[in-house]
Amino acid sequence: MLTLYASKGTGSIAPQALLAYAGATHEIIWIDYDAKEHRSAEFLAINPRGQIPALKLDDETMVTESAAIMLHLADCYPASNLIEKPATTQRAQTYRWMTFMATNVYEDFLRMEYPEHYTSDAAAEASVSASGATSMERSWGILNQSLAGNCHLVGNSLSIADIYMAMLLSWHPDLKGLNKRHSNLLPAAKNTLTAAAIQKVFNENDVHI
Ligand SMILES: N[C@@H](CCC(=O)N[C@@H](CS)C(=O)NCC(=O)O)C(=O)O
């Protein structure tokens, strides 16, 4: 059975939502983030980076990196229509936006919230955090532009990119302000949460849009 290593409110929200939406048989092992269980020797054997999420496949192989987990799970559950077939334009767009969000928005957010992971100079933390916030704003602007006239990042139906974006958006410290500057993001994320299974997972994680 698939096993998702998760922590409430973290990067496991999107894979958890995907599993729920697809109706996939799975188990969740909750890692206590506040107690730093992700830094334990036991968890480092699962993900040497000590990061959530991680997914154990049926054959016990571990997959880490949230975007990779999403792409793989979408392929495993084709009936849920969360990804287009390989070698199509829409598939290419899915790769584009998943990579864009994982390497820009997610990282921008981490830089903003955890600057101490990005500098060993305590005096530089505030500026690392501020540059994370600036970079994140720019990334949201690019996503906002690509959503113009559509509530989906890829094509005209729900995809893993929409679920992933809703998770990242739910972490934003000032959604009202963001919505004033970039008005396509929030409606798209709200549309993603009209899927009851996804909304339920967001509620369980205590994140709201
Ligand atoms: N690139 C990784 C980032 C994952 C990540 O940073 N997860 C956070 C929780 S949202 C974490 O576990 N941080 C703990 C740490 O880096 O020590 C991914 O996309 O899976």
Image (cartoon, helix red, strand yellow):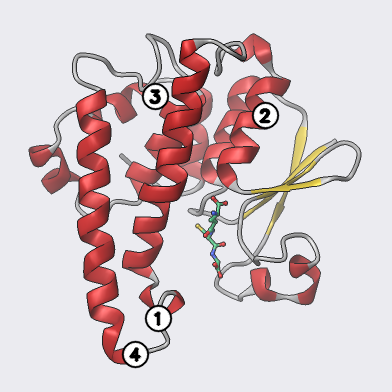
Q: Residue 169 is drawn in which quadrant? A: top left
Label whose residue precedes the other's in the sequence (1 or 2):
2
Who's the residue at 29% across and 51% down the image? 172
Q: Which mark is residue 73?
A: 2
Q: Contact, CB < 8 Å: mark 1 with mark 4?
A: yes
Which circle's residue, 3 or 4, is located before the other in the chain?
4
Q: Position of residue 161 (x, y in %)?
A: 45, 28
Dot 1 or dot 3: first in sequence order is 1
Instruction: Give the CA distance from mark 1 to mark 4.
Output: 7 Å
Front residue of this view, candidates 125 and 199: 125
Which residue lies most toward the right here? Answer: 59
Label 4 is placed on what type of residue? Answer: Ala
Q: Which mark is residue 192?
A: 3
Decide if residue 52 is on the left or right side of residue 181: right
Q: Locate the C terminus by quadrant.
A: top left
Give how far across and how far down residue 190 sits, in percent.
31, 27
Residue that label 1 marks: 119
| Residue found at x 85% / y 35% | 1
State yes or no: discs 3 and 2 in contact (Cβ < 8 Å). Answer: no
Nearer the observer, disc 3 or disc 4? 4
Amino acid on which the number 2 mark rests in the picture: Leu
Label 2 crowd (10 A; few <14 / some 14-19 / many >=20): many
